[in-house]
Image: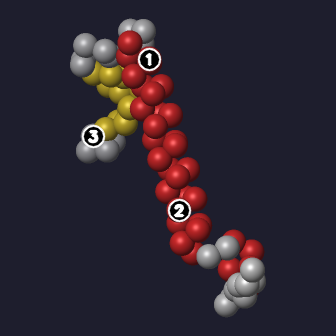
Amino acid sequence: MKEENPSSASEIITGSATDTDKQDAAITDSFRSAVRHTVDFSKSRGCPIARYDAKRKAAYLEYPDGSKVYHEKA
């Protein structure tokens, strides 16, 4: 089996860029899936979901019926 020689010091530490990109993508996909599952589970139990409206720059609770209650600034 031929041993590959990394072309830079960063590749020695982190592996090739494509391997790192694939690992990052897998972690991101896993995280998004977990969040989606948690949100769906919470909605099915009737719990509100905390969200953030970037246009209004305000946090709000979204209830399973779709209603939103914005948090008022103190």
Answer few, some or many: residues within 10 Å of disc 2's Cα (few below 14, many 20 plus, some between 14 and 19): few
- Counting from the top left corner in percent of width and height, residue 64 is at 31, 15
Question: Could you tell me if the residues under marks 3 and 1 are in contact, i.e. CB atoms within 8 Å?
Answer: no
Question: How far is the residue under mark 3 from the one under mark 1?
Answer: 24 Å
Residue linked to disc 3: 56
Mark 2 touches mark 1? (CB < 8 Å): no
Q: Residue at x 24, y 17 (%)?
A: 67
**First along the sequence among labels 2 and 1:** 2
- Residue contact between numbered discs 2 and 3, judged by CB atoms under 8 Å: no
Question: Taking 46 as reference, is 10 left or right?
Answer: right
Query: Is 46 situated above or below 59?
Result: above
Q: Amino acid at mark 2?
A: Lys
| Residue on which disc 1 sits | 42
The correct choice, above or below, for 27 with respect to 22 in the image is: above
SS at circle 2:
helix
Determine the CA span between mark 2 and mark 3. Answer: 35 Å
Q: Nearer the viewer, mark 2 or mark 3?
A: 2
Task: Say what secondary structure mark 3 lies in.
Answer: loop
Based on the displayed image, in which of its 4 quarters is residue 17 positioned? bottom right
**Quadrant assignment, res 13:** bottom right
Task: Please state if 63 lies on the left or on the right of 12 as rendered.
Answer: left
Q: Which residue is mark 2?
A: 22
Left or right of residue 19: residue 62: left
